[in-house]
Image: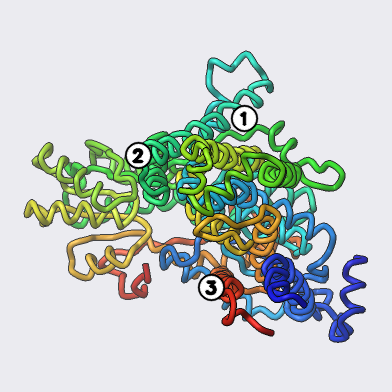
């Protein structure tokens, strides 16, 4: 504080030390994001977050972006702790590397809200709440979409399906596959899942996986992909083989390419996950935590089903 | 005033003047724009600044020698990532299972050795083939990054060891562990460059390689040693940083080479070699971290930070050029 006094004295303008003009009730919330600009999901997320904060007179936000760099994100966490914000929202660049920084915040009695992708379990003790999509429910809903379609087509007792999962090791991939595999036998007990292969979130890889499936199995009635990017890769393979007709494609995280394929009638359905909902849920979770409300540790926002039947209710995803 | 005195004063002092300017600007702007009630020049904040400068700063010290030499090393970011992977992965190797927490120094040692070995490889190729260091280390940058991805695919390599984290987060005499490493490295490289034959040779080679050869300096081995030093420092930077964070993404350290070179150039080291100072590089490192921190403090976004640093870099190079014009066209103020 001494340094500050010297500074203020030396510069007359600093007489206006009514710093920040923040009233006592205003909640100051800092957010450090993963990598804004790397894809339009994250860009839309940031815009929505800022818009939501501006719409709320009780909230002031510090919006930071780590640019995908773990070192920068840790430095930003330290800066936010130093600035004594009331709560920190973090979109982890790496679910484990940020744990010590999150611990520092919790030691400084600043509640931390993790957004979009959770940190590893070792860090759960230091986190107030996780706000993001529920991947198990997403998987289960995809199973329901698939089953409902089979019932419409009258093939629910004989259908054979394949699964293209996300990158091995990723929580999102594991949970979506788990949700799908658990729910499917409950709703459509006679549908058989003949094989699962990872598509690594990659469209080209998924296309190759699907090509192999098409050679191996003469009868494929449905494909479940861990996200639309992979689902569209599988669709491309089926198109090339001339076998799109009669296959029900269901994905998750509706991408623009998936939405367009649905418009063309080639792709059946997906799960609609909006970055706007994601951002608003994160801010709301932080506000609820600060207001002392009872917030569940895993605070999911809703990700509804989208199919060719109801897609007009949703705007086309920007990513 | 003797002609040239002003120029040389400006050259040496420019970076520190710039830092003072930044401090004044962010302190004033912070009063109006920052959400925080705390001043920018709060002591704790300045201590954090030093700590956050460490990852780039430690490598920048090595880059200063290499650039004074007239070379460059673009592979430091990849060495940084590879050393981090060795560090975190070796903590759980079964052969070390009996060591308990004594595995930590072993893992540190292995990571540092890997850094030295990769640096030696760069240096050896530059020495034996005579290919420009820019090209050699550009290849190494891609190649070493390839190794990083081969090690664990796209997935992060992780091992969180709380003993290690507690050590890395410790504060001794108020300074963080990382700060101590940064200061020690700066001091060591300063001694090396100003008090030893090796340091004087580095300037000689950078100034005029042919003359250095004629003077009997063994240029090849000299350059190889410098590449080993920067390899060691890139690994040391990784060791210090990842002790605290415990998980490395395969693309970590990307663009570090550019930030490091930016810091060194801001500090006044010439790309053509022969001139430069370790202390000024330290100033360059602080200037960059101050900008990042300060712009964050007043609520500017990351793209603004990059834009401002880019503009300042060009301004610095222009000023340097003006100050180095001899004779009639010399800068007059």
Q: Which of the pair A88/B28 is nearer the observer?
A: B28
Q: Are marks 3 and 1 in contact (CB under 8 Å)?
A: no
Query: Could you tell me which secondary element the residue under label 1 belongs to?
Result: helix
Spatial separation of the CA atoms under disc 3 and disc 1? 38 Å
Query: Could you tell me which secondary element the residue under label 2 belongs to?
Result: helix
Question: Which residue does the numbered mark 1 point to in the structure image?
Answer: B108
- Mark 2 or 1: the one toward you: 2
> What label sits on residue A319 in the rendered view?
none
For disc 1, the neighbor class at 10 Å (few under 14, some 14 to 19, many from 20) is many
- Mark 3 or 1: the one toward you: 3
Left-right relation of A162 to B55? left
Question: Which residue does the numbered mark 2 point to in the structure image?
Answer: B129
Assign the N terminus of chain A to one quadrant of the image: bottom right
Q: Is residue A177 visible?
A: no
Question: Which residue does the numbered mark 3 point to in the structure image?
Answer: B314
Q: Residue at x 36, y 75 (%)?
A: A315
Q: Which of the pair A203/A254 is nearer the observer?
A: A203
Q: Is residue A76 visible?
A: yes
Give residue B284's position: percent from left, percent from top.
65, 61
Q: Which of the pair A89/B281 is nearer the observer?
A: B281
| Residue B312 occupies quadrant | bottom right
Q: Are marks 2 and 1 in contact (CB under 8 Å)?
A: no
Give residue A124's position: percent from left, percent from top.
64, 43
The disc, 3 or 2, on the residue closer to the chain's N-terminal end is 2
Query: Could you tell me which secondary element the residue under label 3 belongs to?
Result: helix
| Residue B238 occupies quadrant | top right
Q: Are marks 3 and 2 in contact (CB under 8 Å)?
A: no
Give residue A299's position: percent from left, percent from top.
59, 55
* Chain to which the residue tagged by mark 3 belongs: B
Spatial separation of the CA atoms under disc 3 and disc 2? 33 Å
For disc 3, the neighbor class at 10 Å (few under 14, some 14 to 19, many from 20) is few
């Amino acid at each position: 504080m001494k340094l500050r006094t010297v500074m203020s004295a030396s510069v007359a303008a600093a007489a206006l030390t009514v710093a920040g003009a923040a009233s006592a009730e205003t909640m100051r919330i800092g957010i450090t994001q993963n990598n804004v600009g790397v894809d339009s999901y994250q860009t839309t997320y940031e815009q929505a977050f800022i818009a939501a904060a501006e719409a709320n007179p009780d909230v002031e936000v510090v919006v930071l972006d780590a640019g995908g760099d773990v070192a920068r994100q840790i430095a930003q966490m330290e800066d936010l702790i130093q600035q004594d914000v009331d709560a920190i929202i973090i979109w982890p660049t790496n679910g484990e590397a940020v744990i010590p920084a999150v611990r520092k915040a919790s030691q400084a009695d600043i509640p931390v809200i993790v957004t979009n992708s959770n940190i590893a379990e070792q860090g759960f003790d230091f986190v107030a709440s996780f706000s993001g999509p529920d991947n198990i429910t997403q998987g289960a809903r995809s199973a329901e979409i698939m089953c409902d379609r089979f019932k419409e087509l009258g093939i629910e007792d004989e259908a054979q399906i394949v699964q293209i999962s996300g990158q091995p090791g990723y929580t999102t991939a594991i949970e979506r596959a788990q949700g799908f595999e658990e729910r499917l036998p409950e709703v459509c007990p006679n549908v058989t899942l003949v094989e699962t292969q990872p598509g690594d979130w990659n469209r080209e890889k998924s296309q190759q996986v699907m090509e192999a499936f098409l050679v191996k199995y003469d009868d494929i009635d449905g494909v479940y992909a861990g996200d639309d990017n992979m689902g569209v890769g599988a669709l491309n393979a089926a198109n090339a083989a001339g076998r799109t007709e009669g296959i029900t494609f269901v994905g998750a995280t509706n991408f623009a390419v998936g939405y367009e394929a649905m418009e063309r009638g080639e792709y059946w359905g997906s799960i609609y996950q909006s970055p706007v909902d994601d951002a608003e849920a994160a801010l709301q979770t932080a506000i609820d935590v600060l207001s002392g409300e009872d917030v569940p540790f895993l605070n999911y926002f809703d990700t509804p089903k989208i199919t060719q039947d109801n897609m007009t209710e949703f705007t086309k995803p920007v990513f | 005033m003797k002609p040239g005195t002003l120029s040389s004063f400006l050259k040496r002092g420019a970076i520190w003047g710039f830092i003072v300017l930044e401090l004044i600007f962010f302190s004033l702007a912070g009063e109006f724009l920052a959400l925080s009630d705390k001043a920018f020049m709060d002591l704790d904040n300045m201590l954090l600044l030093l700590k956050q400068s460490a990852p780039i700063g430690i490598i920048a010290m090595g880059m200063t020698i290499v650039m004074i030499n007239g070379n460059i090393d673009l592979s430091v970011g990849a060495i940084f990532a590879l050393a981090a992977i060795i560090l975190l992965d070796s903590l759980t190797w079964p052969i070390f299972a009996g060591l308990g927490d004594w595995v930590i120094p072993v893992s540190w040692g292995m990571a540092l050795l890997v850094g030295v070995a990769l640096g030696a490889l760069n240096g050896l190729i530059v020495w034996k083939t005579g290919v420009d260091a820019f090209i050699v280390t550009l290849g190494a940058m891609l190649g070493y990054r390839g190794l990083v991805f081969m090690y664990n695919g796209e997935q992060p390599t992780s091992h969180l060891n709380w003993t290690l984290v507690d050590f890395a987060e410790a504060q001794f005499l108020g300074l963080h562990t990382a700060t101590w490493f940064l200061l020690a490295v700066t001091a060591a490289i300063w001694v090396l460059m100003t008090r030893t034959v090796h340091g004087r040779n580095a300037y000689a080679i950078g100034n005029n390689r042919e003359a250095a050869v004629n003077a009997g300096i063994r240029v090849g081995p000299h350059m190889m040693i410098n590449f080993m030093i920067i390899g060691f420092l890139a690994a040391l930077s990784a060791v210090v940083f990842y002790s605290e964070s415990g998980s490395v993404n395969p693309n970590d350290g990307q663009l570090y080479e550019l930030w490091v070179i930016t810091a060194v150039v801001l500090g006044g080291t010439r790309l053509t070699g022969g001139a430069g100072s370790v202390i000024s590089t330290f100033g360059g490192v602080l200037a960059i971290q101050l900008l990042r921190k300060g712009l964050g403090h007043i609520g500017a976004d990351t793209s603004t930070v990059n834009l401002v640093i880019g503009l300042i870099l060009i301004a610095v190079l222009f000023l340097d050029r003006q100050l180095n014009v001899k004779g009639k066209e010399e800068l007059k103020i």
